Amino acid sequence: MVATNPVQLTMTVLSLILRLIQSLPSGWAGATLSHLGVFSGGKTPSKSRSEFWNGDIPWVTPKDMKSAEIATSEDHVTQDALNAGGLALLPENAVLFVVRSGILRRMFPTAVTRVQCTINQDLKALQLFKPEMARYIQVLSWGFERFILEKLTKTGTTVESLKFGDFANQPFPLPPLEEQHRIVQKVDELMALCDRLEQQTSDQLEAHETLVDTLLDTLTQSENTTELADNWARLAAHFDTLFTTEQSIDKLKQTILQLAVMGRLVEQDVGDESAEQLIERIAAQKAETGNGKRRTSKPPKSGTAESQPFQIPSTWAWVPLRQTGLTSTGKTPSTKNASFFSGDIPFIGPGQVTAAGKINAPEKHLSEEGILQSEEALPGDILTVCIGGSIGKTAIVTERCGFNQQLNKIRPVLVQPRYLLAAINADFFQHSIREKATGSATPIINRSKWESIAIPLAPLTEQKRIVQKVDELMALCDQLKERINQASEARCQLAEAVVENALN
């Protein structure tokens, strides 16, 4: 594997070069950008004036600032738009800066024009008195990006913006013109090297992930315990070289969950109560504890062969999710009544449910009065996001809370909550959620479809053994991921030290 992230290495090289030139060697000077050229802004021509649009003059906006050079743009304007005023035709070798955009939270895009163009109001253009300095000014902005974002940018209510006056009058190190050219040449060489390194890394990662996928698939596709043991031994022999990225470990976690709900993770015990007997007990207890607000389950019935995505042990059974507990959908109390949100009971929405199966701290809290207008979840209940981009994310509740209508809940009855959590998080169940969801922009799966998805139900005592084994293996995966992160950080520090020594 490659020693470090090429993008990080690129930024390390740039920041170290700029750190060196801040010492202002002989012949250098501090200069503001406003002394090196003339700044100008842009505007958006009236959208209602069709004669202003679809011309042949590039009209550059922040969405076009994805590369170091501007040769074209998504939108174009006409000469009529320029004649109307407020737009100037910029020459080649003008330097463009994004001055207003949410992207300024994390980066400071700049580009050099390679064609005549114009810009909108979210950009500023610097037309240099010496246009041949354009690439150096761009390299300068890359090297000082962190400083610009931290010191020369302000946070607005909707988007970030550059403190343009401060930016234009900020002194930056300026070497003689010939030295500028040598610096740009060296940066270009290093950037090309980093590009090759990034491509090499991408190719290696793609091959690595393909190998991991192939070997993990052999585990879930094993036809019997003997074949599974052989496939696991083959994988275990190369464990240290296979699971070297966070992505590969996440895939290993998914495979563990899949094996768990296939009945392949622990041994079956013929003395265990069967799943069919457990289903009967669940139905009886639900009938006793259910209230008038909840639908009673249909008589227990195992899934048909056509509905089974994989084979399970003979003592297990396929059942709709609703037969394993009591289900409900959340609700948001009226925001017009402030007293509903004046307590300390967490109110959970999709944003609090993480991909790791945790529930983050909520933004809102309910009162006792408020939770009566919502839906209550108790420790051991399971919440699944049923609307939006995070559809399918699932977490187990650890403290009493309310939750909104974008979440479905199941309260397990005589079923291990963590076993049920593993089943819902397994690939087959997540695939069913996406398959049954409606809406492309905003996927939605209603409660009826969600609770109808069949899961493989193991005997209760086997569920406990499965949960224990899953917890053990997941802990090992987390430890492995932590070691990988520590090693990656160490490699980055080493790379920075090597580059710094090379430049000294």
Image (tube, grey):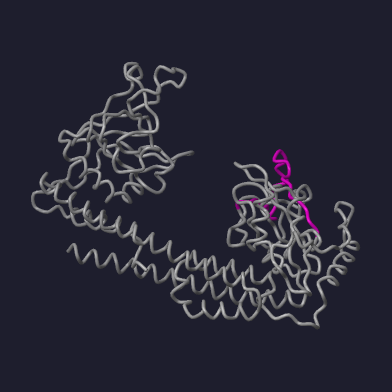
Position of residue 139 in the picture relative to residue 27 (left or right): right
Q: Is residue 334 magenta?
A: yes
**Viewer-proximal residue, 346 or 368?**
346
Residue 127: % across, % down: 22, 32
Relative to 76, say whether 206 is above or below. below
Viewer-proximal residue among 369 and 355? 355
Question: Which residue corresponds to the image point at 40% horizontal and 38% vertical from the top-left?
Answer: 63
Q: In the picture shown, does residue 426 fall above or below 155?
A: below
Image point (40%, 49%), residue name: 106
| Nearer to the camera, 262 or 194 | 262
Using residue 109 as the reference point, say whether residue 340 is left or right of it.
right
Q: Residue at x 23, y 64 (%)?
A: 500
Residue 100 in the image: x percent, y percent? 39, 37
Tell me residue 46's x, y (percent).
43, 20
Within the image, what quadrant is residue 352 found in? bottom right
Which quadrant is home to the N terminus? bottom left
The region drawn magenta spans: 326-351
Pinpoint residue 350: horizontal percent, then vertical percent. Answer: 63, 51
Q: Camera-side residue: 336 or 405?
A: 405
Q: Residue at 68% across / 64% down in the picture?
A: 398
